[in-house]
Amino acid sequence: MIKETKTSSFKLQKAVEDDQKQQQLIPGLPDEIAMECMVRVPYQFHSNMKSVCHTWQHLMSHPSFHQQRLKSGTAEYLVCLVQPLPPIHASSTTTDDDDDPLNSNNNKTIKNEDKREQQHIHSPPQYALSIYNATHNLWQRTRPTEGSGIPMFCQCLALPSSGKLLLLGGWDPTTLEPVPHVYILDLIGTTGAACKWRRGASMSVPRSFFACAVIGPSTVCVAGGHDSQKNALRSAEVYDVETDQWKMLPDMIEERDECQGLAWEGDSKFWVASGYGTESQGQFRSDAEFYDLYTGRWSKVDGVWPFSSTSPRGATTTICVNRRDKHQWLWFLGSEQQSQQQQQSREVVKVGDNIRLEIVSSIPLPNCITGTTPCVTTLDYVGQEGGIIRISIGCL
């Protein structure tokens, strides 16, 4: 009886120890040390790690794991590009005649080549998302499996805090009509072994060549662009990624097609720079508008984009520098735009009592950077909190 009691007690103790080990991230290691090990594993192996056990899957699918990688300096830098897929070569296309080469002749070969060429000409282009891991020098390509694929000229936005990537609007590759589609790629929050695409709620207005930007952790603003009749739009809307809901905003003051969206970390304003109206296509405006999410109003600012023949799309980007109150808006321009800029006075653009814009300096870039007389111009943006947002304009 005493022996049986001792045996049962030993089994119970062993079961408790096994249960404690199962609850540990890595058996035999404190969870703090285990977490330090896990956050250092490169992103390319995360899908395999999620398949190890439910605990790892739950942990690595939670945004807090991504935040821990950011804090520890082990997060990786991803560059995302929407690119057309390479065309399918004629040699990779098979027909019934190709299955038996002994029955082929010159006439059939010419006919098959003509048929393949016609299929290649009339088939719409296919697009995919290319992701470059700059930390580990790796490329991968992905695209949604449902619908007609990634639209042409869609906008690509990243939400770093939640590890999501959004593709918005653009053209249907087959009809060449603007679409309201939203595709979401969750890079860290999927519960399965691999990351998957999903469709988000569609925009209220189909549009392309519009302005968009992320405000805060999960708010996306879009404005302007053009409709299926190439009419420039004034409409704007806001999207909450977490609730998957769109809401219309008040219209902008001006029509703006091919405009550039801007936003800075810690600021509640959505900026829409330049663009042109329906009756002035190709003549880019010098002004901008910003929508304040707190006040719910648009305000117009003159003298922001001085290059009437150059689109700000694809030539500018915003980056953060050191502190939240210092940011940069980089312009990559040529010699013609630089000459226009140098001829302009450095006047202060007063937006309101608490906001002003001022070009304060023009700095040549190093000789090792090739281009046409490169320079960097600094523009100070003093916001409502008194913080300076420094906007640097690089001409290459």
Image (cartoon, rainbow, N blue to C red):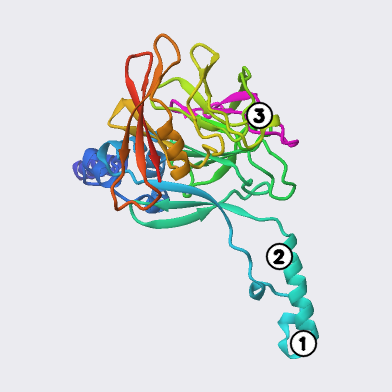
Q: Quadrant of the N terminus?
A: top left
Amino acid type at circle 1 is Asn
Q: Sort mark 2 into few (<14), some (14-19) or many (20+) by Cα contacts within 10 Å.
A: some
Please state which of the two labelled residues, at mark 2 or mark 3, is closer to the viewer: 3
Q: Image check: 234 left or right of 61?
A: right
**Residue at 64 percent of width and 31 percent of height:** 203
Element under label 1?
Answer: helix
Foreground label between 1 and 3: 3
Instruction: Give amino acid for label 2.
Output: His
Query: Mark on residue 120?
Result: 2
Question: Where, by quadrant of the figure, is residue 11 drawn?
Answer: top left
The residue located at (40%, 49%) in the rendering is 372
Q: Main secondary structure of the magenta part?
A: loop
Q: Position of residue 287 (x, y in %)?
A: 53, 24
Distance (Cα) linking label 2 and label 1: 21 Å
Element on which disc 2 rests: helix
Q: Magenta stretch: residue 215 in it? A: yes
Where residue 278 sits in the image (x, y, percent)? 69, 30
Question: In the image, which disc is placed on residue 277?
Answer: 3
How packed mark 3 is, by other alpha carbons closer than 10 Å (few <14, some 14-19, many 20 or more), is: many
Q: Residue furthest bottom?
A: 102
Residue beneath disc 1 = 106
Q: Residue at x 37, y 49 (%)?
A: 43
Q: Nearer the viewer, residue 192 or 370?
A: 370
Image coords of residue 46 (percent x, y):
39, 49
Between 57 and 12, the residue placed more toward the observer is: 57
Specify start and end residues of the magenta stretch as a single range. 214-243
Horizontal side of residue 120 vs 136, given as left or right: right
Dot 1 crowding, Cα within 10 Å, few <14, some 14–19, many 20+: few
Q: Tell me where residue 95 sits by quadrant.
A: bottom right
Question: What is the spatial separation of the Cα atoms under label 1 and label 3, in whole angstroms?
Answer: 56 Å
